[in-house]
Amino acid sequence: MNIAILSRNRELYSTRRLVEACQQRGHEVRVIDTLRCYMTIASQRPTIHYKGEKITGIDAVIPRIGASITFFGTAVVRQFEMMNVYCLNESVAISRSRDKLRSLQLLARRGIGLPVTGFAHSTQYTKDLINQAGGAPLVVKLLEGTQGIGVVLADTQKAAESIIEAFRGLKAQILVQEFIKEAGGADIRCLVIGDKVVASMQRQGGEGEFRSNIHRGGKASAARLTPEERSTAVRSAKIMGLNVAGVDILRSNHGPVVMEVNSSPGLEAVEKSTGKDVAAAVVSFIEKKAKPGKTATRGKG
Ligand code: ADP
């Protein structure tokens, strides 16, 4: 097959591993810098151009769209869909997963366990919003944050009010969330491909840190999932419409709760901590599924 990886940087671990896996399995592969694509939008024969050349003959696209380029990145993926090229994760699903609130609403509607989460536009009812989310201690999150930046633990009601006021003063969109204390500064990343969890790791935050992000000094180790965690992860990816997803779960007293579903999960920590060849599993999934015109939405929505 002829596979294209949409990635800003071919040197990134995940991109390198996907290239290797494609080559090992006998495919032609090229890395395309998403931001260097340009396109003509016409009702007939939509095209994508890259560095002066028209892109043709691609059988499958692996989108690795960073959060900061979601807008343009999903437009490129949508264009491939319009050209009938199979995209591992579809543009609509990627956009959906990038909107934290929308994701939580979709998951809630289907009965997935979530931390109680509050969101408001008006600053008038902050106290009640805090109460609705169970009161302090409380997690306050920037809607646009990644890698744990903009995730703050407010220990008291007063602290929660001040943090919310401060963020609001900066015109930032935030959500407030029940603090899952019993998770003990750890979360579980489940790497879902199709209807399986192919690898799972626990990330444990450093001493005194409730955030487990690797970028914040968290340590990864292989995790054993309960059947409930496994099915929560697979269902969450399915609800989001993602074939490949990193589903982040907290172990709460009331069962697994989903924090986030990632559409371009990093492979480094999960491969290194579990010893699993996730890149090969991704390519093997594409081999089974990629057919021209098989995109469910064809860029609709
Ligand atoms: P980001 O998308 O920036 O990584 P997250 O929402 O995943 O932000 O939060 C970062 C980390 O903070 C999580 O990995 C988790 O360890 C911790 N965390 C987030 N929300 C909660 C919560 N409601 N209760 C307990 N810990 C949380």
Image (cartoon, helix red, strand yellow):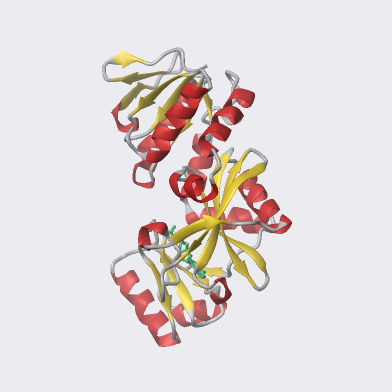
Extreme-front residue of the structure:
275
- The picture quadrant where one finds residue 73 is top left
Q: Residue furthest right?
A: 227
Judging depth in this view, the residue of 290 and 144 nearest the camera is 290
Q: Position of residue 289 (x, y in %)?
A: 63, 26
User: 285 above or below 124?
Assistant: above
Closest to the observer, 82 or 136: 136
Q: Residue at x 43, y 18 (%)?
A: 46
Q: What residue do we see at 54% from left, 68% from top? A: 117
In the rendering, at what x and y percent does residue 16 appear? 39, 33
At horizontal 53% and vertical 62% (from top left) the residue drawn is: 187
Q: How many marks?
A: 0
**Vertical arrangement, residue 18 with respect to residue 66, above or below:** above
Q: Quadrant of residue 208?
A: bottom left
Residue 296 in the image: x percent, y percent? 61, 30
Q: Nearer the viewer, residue 245 or 103?
A: 245
- Vertical placement of residue 203 versus 282, above or below: below
Q: Residue at x 53, y 45 (%)?
A: 275
Q: Position of residue 58 (x, y in %)?
A: 47, 17
In the shown orientation, is residue 294 left or right of residue 220?
right
